[in-house]
Protein backbone atom coordinates (compact mmCIF):
# COMPACT_ATOMS: atom_id res chain seq x y z
CA UNK A 1 0.00 0.00 0.00
CA UNK A 2 2.73 2.49 0.92
CA UNK A 3 4.50 1.80 -2.37
CA UNK A 4 1.27 2.57 -4.23
CA UNK A 5 1.04 5.88 -2.41
CA UNK A 6 4.65 6.65 -3.34
CA UNK A 7 3.74 6.01 -6.96
CA UNK A 8 0.74 8.37 -6.81
CA UNK A 9 2.42 10.95 -4.58
CA UNK A 10 6.15 11.07 -5.44
CA UNK A 11 8.03 12.66 -2.53
CA UNK A 12 10.13 14.81 -4.85
CA UNK A 13 6.93 16.35 -6.23
CA UNK A 14 4.96 16.72 -2.99
CA UNK A 15 7.96 17.46 -0.75
CA UNK A 16 7.38 15.10 2.18
CA UNK A 17 9.87 13.07 4.19
CA UNK A 18 7.70 10.60 6.12
CA UNK A 19 4.89 8.33 4.92
CA UNK A 20 3.14 5.68 6.98
CA UNK A 21 0.01 3.60 6.57
CA UNK A 22 -0.33 2.04 10.03
CA UNK A 23 -1.24 -1.61 10.52
CA UNK A 24 -3.90 -2.42 13.09
CA UNK A 25 -3.19 -5.68 14.90
CA UNK A 26 -6.70 -5.80 16.31
CA UNK A 27 -8.30 -5.85 12.86
CA UNK A 28 -5.36 -7.57 11.10
CA UNK A 29 -5.24 -5.03 8.29
CA UNK A 30 -3.82 -1.71 7.21
CA UNK A 31 -5.72 1.35 8.33
CA UNK A 32 -7.62 3.46 5.81
CA UNK A 33 -5.48 6.53 6.46
CA UNK A 34 -1.90 7.62 5.91
CA UNK A 35 0.38 9.87 7.93
CA UNK A 36 2.63 12.22 5.99
CA UNK A 37 5.15 14.83 7.13
CA UNK A 38 5.85 17.64 4.73
CA UNK A 39 9.10 19.57 4.51
CA UNK A 40 7.32 22.91 4.80
CA UNK A 41 3.95 24.45 5.55
CA UNK A 42 3.66 25.55 1.92
CA UNK A 43 4.21 21.96 0.72
CA UNK A 44 1.50 20.72 3.10
CA UNK A 45 -0.84 23.45 1.95
CA UNK A 46 -0.23 22.66 -1.72
CA UNK A 47 -0.95 18.97 -1.07
CA UNK A 48 -4.13 19.87 0.79
CA UNK A 49 -5.42 22.09 -2.01
CA UNK A 50 -4.59 19.43 -4.61
CA UNK A 51 -6.05 16.40 -2.87
CA UNK A 52 -8.58 17.26 -0.14
CA UNK A 53 -12.07 15.97 -1.01
CA UNK A 54 -10.73 14.40 -4.22
CA UNK A 55 -11.20 10.75 -5.14
CA UNK A 56 -8.08 8.72 -4.73
CA UNK A 57 -6.78 7.81 -8.20
CA UNK A 58 -6.91 4.10 -8.92
CA UNK A 59 -8.72 3.51 -5.63
CA UNK A 60 -10.14 0.21 -6.80
CA UNK A 61 -6.79 -1.19 -7.87
CA UNK A 62 -5.05 0.15 -4.77
CA UNK A 63 -7.55 -1.56 -2.47
CA UNK A 64 -8.47 1.73 -0.80
CA UNK A 65 -12.18 1.62 -1.46
CA UNK A 66 -14.24 2.75 -4.38
CA UNK A 67 -13.94 5.74 -6.65
CA UNK A 68 -16.82 7.31 -4.73
CA UNK A 69 -14.59 7.55 -1.66
CA UNK A 70 -13.01 10.95 -1.31
CA UNK A 71 -10.00 11.84 0.76
CA UNK A 72 -10.30 13.98 3.84
CA UNK A 73 -7.02 15.63 4.68
CA UNK A 74 -6.46 17.03 8.15
CA UNK A 75 -3.62 18.31 10.27
CA UNK A 76 -2.10 15.73 12.60
CA UNK A 77 -1.45 16.32 16.28
CA UNK A 78 2.19 15.26 15.94
CA UNK A 79 4.39 17.24 13.55
CA UNK A 80 7.78 16.62 11.98
CA UNK A 81 9.58 13.61 10.56
CA UNK A 82 11.78 12.96 13.59
CA UNK A 83 8.92 13.17 16.10
CA UNK A 84 6.87 10.80 13.96
CA UNK A 85 9.77 8.35 13.61
CA UNK A 86 10.24 8.24 17.38
CA UNK A 87 6.51 7.83 17.95
CA UNK A 88 6.01 5.21 15.24
CA UNK A 89 8.91 3.09 16.49
CA UNK A 90 7.04 2.46 19.72
CA UNK A 91 4.12 1.08 17.71
CA UNK A 92 5.86 -0.70 14.83
CA UNK A 93 7.47 -4.06 15.59
CA UNK A 94 10.91 -4.84 14.23
CA UNK A 95 11.16 -6.25 10.73
CA UNK A 96 7.61 -5.57 9.62
CA UNK A 97 6.66 -4.91 6.02
CA UNK A 98 4.51 -2.06 7.35
CA UNK A 99 7.32 0.16 8.65
CA UNK A 100 7.08 3.84 7.77
CA UNK A 101 8.94 5.18 4.75
CA UNK A 102 11.50 7.84 5.66
CA UNK A 103 13.53 10.22 3.49
CA UNK A 104 16.63 12.05 4.71
CA UNK A 105 17.28 15.77 4.29
CA UNK A 106 18.60 15.14 0.77
CA UNK A 107 15.48 13.26 -0.34
CA UNK A 108 17.07 9.80 -0.26
CA UNK A 109 15.04 6.94 1.15
CA UNK A 110 16.57 5.60 4.36
CA UNK A 111 15.87 2.55 6.51
CA UNK A 112 13.29 3.40 9.17
CA UNK A 113 14.98 1.39 11.94
CA UNK A 114 18.47 2.75 11.20
CA UNK A 115 17.14 6.31 11.07
CA UNK A 116 15.42 5.80 14.41
CA UNK A 117 18.59 4.44 15.99
CA UNK A 118 20.58 7.43 14.64
CA UNK A 119 18.03 9.81 16.19
CA UNK A 120 18.45 8.13 19.56
CA UNK A 121 22.23 8.12 19.42
CA UNK A 122 22.31 11.79 18.35
CA UNK A 123 19.90 12.74 21.14
CA UNK A 124 22.03 10.82 23.63
CA UNK A 125 25.10 12.88 22.68
CA UNK A 126 23.47 16.29 22.91
CA UNK A 127 22.51 16.59 19.24
CA UNK A 128 19.20 17.98 18.04
Image (cartoon, rainbow, N blue to C red):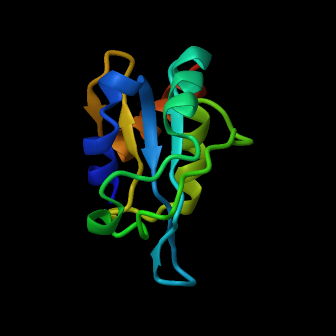
- Expressed as whole percent of the image width and height from the top left, the position of residue 109 reads 27, 33
Residue reaching furthest to the front: 68
Corner quadrant of residue 108:
top left
Q: Could you tell me which residue is drawn at 52 percent across and 67 percent down?
A: 31
Instruction: Please state the total of marks drawn on the protein image.
Output: 0
Whole-percent x and y of residue 49?
Answer: 56, 29
Tell me where residue 67 appears, x and y as whole percent. Answer: 41, 63
Depth order, front residue of 126/105: 105
User: Residue at (45%, 37%) from the top-left corner?
Assistant: 18
> Considering only vertical position in the picture, is 79 above or below 21?
above
Which part of the image, by quadrant, shows the C terminus?
Answer: top right
Q: Is residue 127 visible?
A: no
Vertical comparison of 61 with 78: above or below: below
In the picture as drawn, the residue positioned furthest to the right comes out as 77
Question: Residue drawn 41% across and 23% down?
Answer: 15
Residue sitting nearer the eye, 125 or 48: 48
**Foreground of the two, 92 or 125:** 92
Give the left or right position of residue 64, taking residue 110 as reference: right
Amino acid sequence: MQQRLLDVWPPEVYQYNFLHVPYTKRQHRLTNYAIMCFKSASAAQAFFFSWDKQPFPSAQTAGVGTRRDTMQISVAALHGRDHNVLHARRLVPSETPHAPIVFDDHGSRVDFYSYHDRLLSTAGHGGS
